Image (cartoon, rainbow, N blue to C red):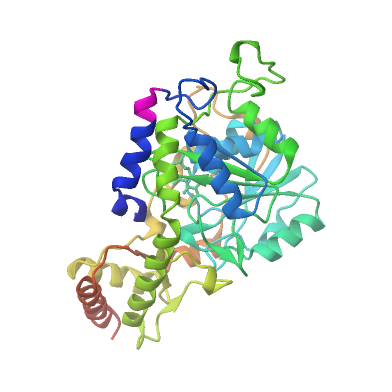
Amino acid sequence: MPGTELFGEEEKKEIMDVLESGILFRYNHDQQRNGHWKARSFENELAIYHGIRYAHLTSSGTSADNLALAGCGIGFGDEVILPPFTFIAPVEAVLMAGAVPVFAEIDETLCLNPAAIEKVITPRTRAVMLVHMCGSMAQIDEIADLCKKHNLLLIEDTAQAIGATFRGRALGTFGKIAVFSFDFFKIITAGEGGAILTDDQSVYEIASQFSDHGHNHTGNNRGAEPHPLLGTNYRISELHAAIGLAQFRKLPYILERQRANKSKLVDAFYGFPQISFRKVPDVNGDSATFLDFFLEDEQSARKVLKTFDKHGVSYAYWYDNNYHYFKNWDHLKMLKTASPQGISALKPLQDYKTLQLPESDKIMSRLISIQIRITWTDSDLQLLSENIKKALREALL
Ligand SMILES: Cc1ncc(COP(=O)(O)O)c(C=O)c1O
């Protein structure tokens, strides 16, 4: 992914600041840290970039998903609407909160379909947890309106789409709270790490306290700080925050390179009427992490996969992948967790074993994605385009 293609002196410098002071903890130790507050600086820059009041870093995107739900006070018995095409983390977070994941169909944006959301709302629905998949956006304006209409909280999981915008406004700023991930496979990486972003002071305070055993972070005497609530440890370390900070400053460059390379690669697909592209509600705001396209049916998609293999074209076929698509989540269908009792509170709700999502299946089985690299040279791009054309001709003409 792009961030990992760009490690350099900037990351090293930020890390050395931390190592030289010896303070790897993000709070307190004001005298010893030589003025270096990496987590705090990264939070400030994230908030300013997004035009949002509060950002709070976490140990991972998954803990940010958990924190977003905690910040919104979502808990036992609440229903949260989710897409079946997502990394499984937000689904697990809903379960960990004691709440109930309810799945709705996606559409050709690869994200939740607004009309499908409306069909699964019940009196117990508290939130829609939207996932902006593969670097681009859901129909965020319609979904935000729908949440307002039904008095639902909108949580944006923007883990895969930092820097993407809809009509000039950053994804992650449309709902009550947003989640980001900086794991090794994201647009920018801290190795591990995540963040929440919100404009709501009370949501921010609860989230920040919950992420640090309830500490309310007042003053510099940690031992004397009040703990208004019970929480856990989702803290980021200064080392991870330091890497994330250096990477975040490279985001504009990453976006520019991704967009330029995607626009060159797209030409390889012209002349094949069997191919259509993912629906992107605002093409100018696409982060361009992936080029996503559809074939007419599953059989043609599988033919293309074979010729891609033959010509050395790398791709993702999410329909078969067992951590991004609902169809393959046997552990969820069996309600398997660490406790031998399973997740018994869920039993009366959607039966995941028999749940059918035919619209999503139809979309996912036809979808192939190609990841855009920022370090491609012109000759890499030319060779890849030629191989794509050869593979498509063999499969489709
Ligand atoms: C949409 C989405 N949400 C949450 C996460 C979890 O992030 P992390 O791996 O940092 O825990 C991921 C990771 O792939 C993701 O893709």
Q: Is residue 20 magenta?
A: yes
The part of the image, by quadrant, that contains residue 215 is top right
The quadrant the N terminus occupies is bottom left
Residue at image point 36% right, 44% down: 184
Residue 386 appears in the figure: yes
Residue 269 vertical placement versus 78 (above, below): below
The residue lying furthest to the top in this view is 223
Q: Do we see residue 75 in this rendering?
A: no
Measuring from the top left, give residue 320's x and y in whole percent. 37, 55
Please indicate whether residue 349 sits to the left or right of residue 386 in the image. Answer: right
Question: 80 and 217: which one is in front?
Answer: 217
Numbered circles on residues, count: 0
**Where does the image place residue 34, in percent across and percent down from the top left?**
45, 27
Quarter of the image where the C terminus is located: bottom left
Q: Residue at 40% x, 75% y: name it.
A: 295
Q: Closest to the observer: 119 or 50?
A: 50
Residue 187 coordinates in the image, percent (x, y):
41, 54
At x 29%, y 67%, the residue is 305
Residue 128 on the magenta span: no
Residue nearest the observer in this picture, 296 or 235: 235
Region in magenta:
18-22
Image-based side of 72 in relation to 397, left or right: right
Compare residues 101 and 15 and report the one nearer the observer.
Answer: 15
- Where 215 sits versus 48, above or below? above
Look at the magenta stretch and give its main secondary structure.
helix
Q: Position of residue 77 (x, y in %)?
A: 71, 34
What residue do we see at 35% from left, 81% from top?
269
